[in-house]
Image: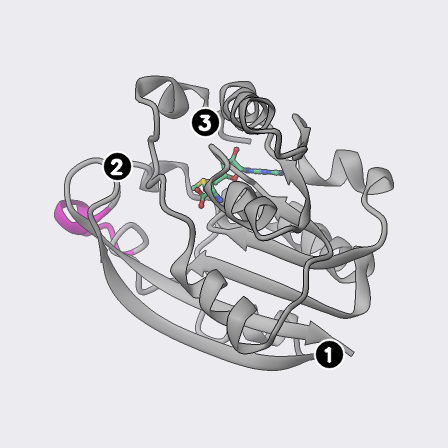
């Protein structure tokens, strides 16, 4: 697994400090009420912090010690009570019960393919019936996949798996798909301006 410690040690917020607008939009649109939530690959905690401030009981899973410590320090300083698990996802499944919402923002593509398949199976298992997932991944439209180095993220060399067309959606064909889209978007949040091919899924376990 790639170690994000170097990135997270560079500056206060390596990735944007701002939470995912897409996640916030779907929470509001589908009136997802506060529940126990998992932020899988929480990074420096931007989405965990947002969810916690909304009243969710958040478990932030982040194998980078630097990232995990940042989340814990922010949570302690602000009395948020985020439970930070400084480990990788499959290692901590036994501590994930009664989950009503799971967010995974550009973390599944950092896993080896067979591990990622297990991770998706586990996401489905730990989620309550009626629970929601919001997942974003990089796709084969990403300049990093196409070796267009001038448009690619400086992190592309670390991506293990770019998702094929409809691949993310097909993994969740047993869920109610409330939103699925694939698109290319500029990213100016870290490093030189670059582009990403992305797939975005919001779905409900039935
Ligand atoms: C591109 S960063 C995204 C961080 C965060 N989701 C965000 O949007 O700011 C990907 C994160 O996934 C984490 N990650 C990679 N493999 C993981 C695994 N097996 N279990 C949990 N997290 C993992 C990395 O440590 C890294 O922090």
| Cα–Cα gap, marks 2 and 3 | 13 Å
Residue 122 vertical position relative to residue 111 in the rendered view, above or below: below
| Cα–Cα gap, marks 2 and 1 | 35 Å
Whether the residue under disc 3 has CB within 8 Å of ligand 1: yes
Residue 154 is labelled as 2
Residue 29 vertical position relative to residue 152 in the rendered view, above or below: below
Q: Which residues are magenta?
A: 146-152
Which of the image's four quarters has the C terminus? bottom right
Q: Nearer the viewer, residue 165 or 11?
A: 11
Residue 89 vertical position relative to residue 134 in the rendered view, above or below: above
Q: Nearer the viewer, residue 204 or 81?
A: 81
Residue 25 place in picture, x, y as percent: 45, 69
Q: Which residue is found at the position 63% from the left and 50% from the top? A: 116
| Whether residue 167 can be seen here | no
Q: Which residue is mark 1?
A: 174
| Whether residue 33 can be seen here | yes
Whichever of labels 2 and 3 marks the residue nearer the N terminus, that label is: 3
């Amino acid at each position: 697994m790639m170690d994000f410690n170097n990135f997270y040690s560079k500056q206060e917020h390596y990735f944007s400090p701002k939470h995912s607008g897409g996640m916030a939009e779907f929470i509001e649109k589908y009136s997802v009420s506060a529940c126990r939530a998992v932020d899988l690959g929480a990074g420096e905690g931007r989405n965990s912090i947002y969810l916690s401030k909304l009243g969710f009981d958040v478990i932030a899973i982040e194998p980078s010690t630097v990232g995990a410590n940042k989340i814990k320090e922010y949570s302690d300083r602000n009395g948020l009570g985020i439970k930070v698990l400084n480990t990788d996802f499959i290692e901590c499944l036994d501590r994930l019960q009664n989950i009503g919402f799971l967010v995974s923002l550009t973390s599944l593509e950092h896993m080896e393919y067979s591990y990622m398949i297990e991770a998706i199976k586990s996401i489905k298992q730990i989620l309550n019936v009626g629970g929601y997932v919001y997942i974003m991944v990089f796709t084969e439209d990403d300049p990093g996949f196409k070796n267009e180095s001038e448009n690619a993220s400086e992190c592309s060399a670390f991506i293990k798996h770019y998702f094929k067309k409809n691949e993310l959606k097909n993994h969740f064909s047993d869920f109610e798909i409330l939103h699925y889209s694939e698109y290319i978007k500029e990213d100016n949040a870290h490093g030189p301006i670059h582009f990403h091919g992305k797939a975005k899924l919001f779905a409900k376990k039935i």
